[in-house]
Image (spheres, grey):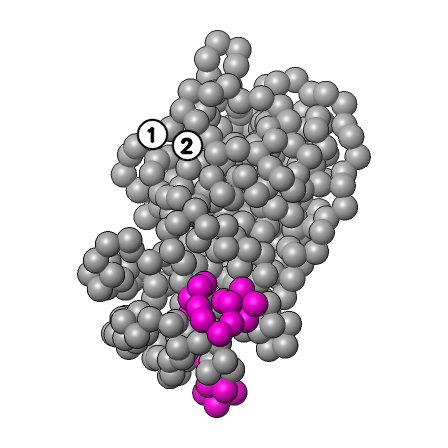
């Protein structure tokens, strides 16, 4: 089996050395070249034809985003961004995902060498995922979705629950952006590290008709609002307080290697919303969310999975479908409309 060919673009000699050590320590991949800036990288890409590029966000001579935009237009290839944990870094990283980057890793704030080597398995997994990603699917997500028609006000007991991982930031934007103000409340778990979900929610809030925010423990869940689980720090659950839904944030261990976990959200929705909910599992690597979606379906909720053609990575939807957790497989461009159609019906007929 041939190794995944990786090219690292980073202005830091230490980062280039560390990325080379990490990549070459895994038997299924190799660092074929490194570049201190995008201008050098252009020639190396032609020479070595790498399968995955790791790209620093902030570099001299040409900004990482400018280079990424040109690369995705002229020679599309899977890119994993290497980002700082600053507020500005998270904004730039989200823009990079919008431009077509598959995923990102964060630089540790202290102890670069020790921190990066501790990330070795995570970086390798992201490179493997990127090598298998569908770049045409990210183009589908980048197209602006048409606004959906206003809908009659539904009872506050109706709820939409969404889970996603790799490729999910743009898929979620595509689902949420056309939703009308009168739609039911939405709870979202997207696999993301700490420090990025607030920027993600703020960006969506500017783009969408509905209000989007990072979830806070104990807050009431309201129609016309979407709540994003805080990244890296805790799990998010749906809870009840009398007749109202509320957010519960739990500082537990990772589930399926993730915190927040999609399974944790979906299982709580199965317990507390039952047939009043619609569950959707979007693009992502692994199996997080499959068991929770099955529990939702068994509790009477209507469940959907994004189809393979529109997924950047089909792992999570595939696992849910194989488990019998899915009522309907839907292309990304139709998920928002199908969610609203099902929740408007109340308990939908099984397909």
Task: Name which residue lies at 34% across and 79% down.
Answer: 30
Going from the N terminus, do you reach mark 1 or mark 2 first? 2
Which residue is label 2 attached to? 236
Q: Is 188 left or right of 75, judged from the image as shown?
A: left
Task: Name which residue lies at 63% across and 77% down.
Answer: 74
- Counting from the top left corner in percent of width and height, residue 145 is at 72, 48
- Counting from the top left corner in percent of width and height, residue 322 is at 50, 51
Determine whether 21 is above or below 227 in the image. below
Name the element at disc 2: strand
Q: Which of the numbered marks, if any, corresponds to residue 122?
A: none
**Does the magenta segment cover residue 54?**
yes
Mark count: 2
Determine whether 41 is above or below 211 in the image. below
* Figure quadrant of residue 159: top right
What's the magenta region? 43-67
- Tag 1 near tag 2, CB within 8 Å: yes
Name the element at disc 1: strand
Q: Inspect this view and state whether residue 338 appears.
A: no
Determine whether 254 is above or below 246 in the image. below
**Does the magenta segment cover residue 286?**
no
- Counting from the top left corner in percent of width and height, residue 348 is at 68, 30
Residue with the most extreme front position: 61
The one of 144 and 5 positioned closer to us in this rendering: 144
Residue with the most extreme bottom position: 47
* Figure quadrant of residue 68: bottom right
Q: Is 302 left or right of 166, judged from the image as shown?
A: right
Which residue is label 1 attached to? 250
Q: CA distance from mark 1 to mark 2?
A: 6 Å
Q: Is 122 left or right of 167, judged from the image as shown?
A: left
Report crowding for label 1: few under 14, some 14 to 19, many 20 or more residues within 10 A (C-alpha): some
Q: Is 296 left or right of 254, judged from the image as shown?
A: right
């Amino acid at each position: 089996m041939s190794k995944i060919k990786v090219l690292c673009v980073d202005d830091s000699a230490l980062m280039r050395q560390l990325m080379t050590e990490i990549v070459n320590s895994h038997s299924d991949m190799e660092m074929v070249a490194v570049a201190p800036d995008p201008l050098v990288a252009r020639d190396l890409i032609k020479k070595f034809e790498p399968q995955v590029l790791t790209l620093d966000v902030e570099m001299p001579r040409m900004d990482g985003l400018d280079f990424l935009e040109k690369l995705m237009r002229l020679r599309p290839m899977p890119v994993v961004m290497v980002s700082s944990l600053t507020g500005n870094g998270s904004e730039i990283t989200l823009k990079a995902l919008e431009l077509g980057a598959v995923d990102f890793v964060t630089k540790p704030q202290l102890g670069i060498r020790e921190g990066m080597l501790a990330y070795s398995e995570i970086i390798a997994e992201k490179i493997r995922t990127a090598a298998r990603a569908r770049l045409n699917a990210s183009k589908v997500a980048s197209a602006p979705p048409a606004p959906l028609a206003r809908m009659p006000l539904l009872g506050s007991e109706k709820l939409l629950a969404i889970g996603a991982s790799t490729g999910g930031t743009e898929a979620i934007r595509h689902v949420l952006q056309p939703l009308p103000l009168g739609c039911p409340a939405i709870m979202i778990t997207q696999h993301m590290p700490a420090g990025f979900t607030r920027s993600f929610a703020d960006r969506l809030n500017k783009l969408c008709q509905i209000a989007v925010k990072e979830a806070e423990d104990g807050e009431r869940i309201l129609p016309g609002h979407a709540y994003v689980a805080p990244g890296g720090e805790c799990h998010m659950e749906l809870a009840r307080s009398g007749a109202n839904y509320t957010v519960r944030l739990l500082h537990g261990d990772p589930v399926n290697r993730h915190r927040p976990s999609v399974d944790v959200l979906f299982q709580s929705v199965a317990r507390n919303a039952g047939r009043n909910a619609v569950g959707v599992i979007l693009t992502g690597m692994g199996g997080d969310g499959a068991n929770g979606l099955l529990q939702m379906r068994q509790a009477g909720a209507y469940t959907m999975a994004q189809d393979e053609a529109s997924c950047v990575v089909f792992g999570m939807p595939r696992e849910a479908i194989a488990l019998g957790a899915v009522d309907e497989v839907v292309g990304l461009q139709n998920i928002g409309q199908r969610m609203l159609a099902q929740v408007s019906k109340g308990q939908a007929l099984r397909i």
